[in-house]
Image (cartoon, rainbow, N blue to C red):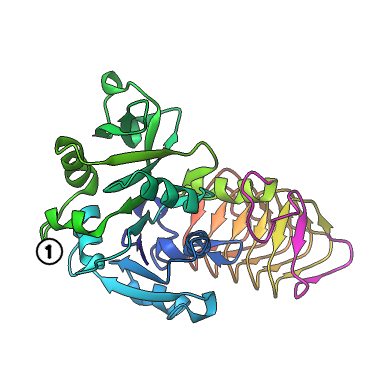
Amino acid sequence: MRAILLAGGKGTRLRPLTLNTPKPIVPIFDRPFLQYQIDLLRQVPDIDEIVLSLNYQPRRIEEVFGDGSDLGIHLRYVVEPNPLGTGGAIKFAAEQYRGAPLVVFNGDVFTSVDLPAVLALHRERKAKATIVLTPVDNPTAYGLVETDKDGNVQAFLEKPTPDQIRCDTINAGIYILEPETLDRIPVDTVYSIERGYFPSLVANQETFVAYTYRGYWLDIGAPDKYRQAHLDIMDGRFSAAPFAGRPGAAVVSPDARIDDGVTIEGPCYIGPGSVIRRGTRIGPHSVLGSHCHIGEDVTIDGAILWPNTWVDSEAKLGPVIAGRHTHFGRNVEVGGTALFGDKSVITDYSKA
C-alpha cells in the first residue's frame, strides 16, 4: 500500500527560516517535521512505501531521510519538473499505481488523527474518496466542506467568503483515494484537487465520504503555528517525543554540559552537545537545539534556537525563533516574536 506526502512547498510563510531548510525538515525538538508524519503513517501496517512529492530543495530532504531504512519503511522521492498543484502532484507521484487505496497527506499537517480508523471507514463505505475534516473557529482561510447526516460530502468550497459559511468543518489535508479516480486528472498539468477533483466527485454523485476528527490538528506553515506545535508537545496537548509521557518536564540531553548555578525551568528542551554556562536561566517553553552554546548570565524566555546557535554573556532573549548558526552578541536584548534566518548576527548591545 502506498502513501503520498505532498512536501513540495517553498515554506514562504516561514521565511527566513526556510531559505536554507525546506519546510519538511524544519526541526521540532531536533526532529525533522516530516518524521512526525511518517510516524503517523506507520500506524497503518499495510503501508509499505511512502512517496515524497518534492519541488523545493529536494536533495536536502533526501539527505536527511535517505531510503527510509532507519525509519523502518521504504521512502521514494519524486520531483515535479514544474509545480503541478495539489492534484497534479498526486497524479505525478501515483504514476500508474493500481491496487490498494492511496493515503495522501498535505505537507503542513501536524495531527494525531486515528489513521487506521479513517481507512476502515473508507473500506466500510466502499468509498471512491474519503477526506478528513476538522472543525475550526474561522474557516475562511481553508477549504470548507459540507456533509449530510450520513457523512457524505455535499459541497466543497475552497477558502469561502463569510456569507458562504454554513458549517465549521474544513479540509484537514488528509485523504484516502481509490487509484482509478485519479484518471480524471490530466497528466503534467497544473490541477487542484480542491477545486477540480473533489467537486467532480460531488457532481458525479460518487461515494465521497468524510471522517470528522475533533482531536489535535494544526497547520504548522506559519511562525505562530510552528511555535504552537512546540508548546503543545511540551504541555501535553499533543503526545510526541521527546515529551511523550512527561509533559511539563525539563528535557535535558545527557550529552549537554550544564554548569553549576544554571536555572532550568520546565517545560523546556536542551539538545545534545549544548553548553550552558553559570548564572544563566532557561525559562519555560524554551527550546535549545543540538550544540547550542549559551554564555554566562544569559536569560532565555521562550526562545526556539535551532542547532549551533551561540548566545554571548548577559544576553536576554524573549520568544524569538533563530535559525542555525545564529550569533547573539553580549548584552543583546531581543523580545517579541522576531525571526532570524540561518547565520544571522545580532551584534553586542543590540536591542529589539
SS assignment for the magenta stretch, majority: loop
Q: Position of residue 204 (x, y in %)?
A: 14, 39
Which residue is labeled 1 in the image? 188
User: Which span is picked out in magenta?
Assistant: 236-262
Q: Is residue 91 left or right of residue 319?
A: left
User: Looking at the image, which is closer to me, 276 or 188?
Assistant: 188
Q: Quadrant of residue 309?
A: bottom right
| Point 23% across, 48% down: residue | 193
Q: Is residue 304 left or right of residue 165?
A: right
Looking at the rendered structure, the kind of residue marked 1 is Asp
Magenta includes 192? no
How many numbered marks have been drawn onto this rendered protein structure? Answer: 1
Q: Quadrant of residue 278?
A: bottom right
Q: Position of residue 336 (x, y in %)?
A: 57, 43
Q: Position of residue 337 (x, y in %)?
A: 54, 45
Q: Is the N terminus in the top left, top right, bottom left or bottom right quadrant?
A: bottom left
| Point 25% across, 54% down: residue | 86
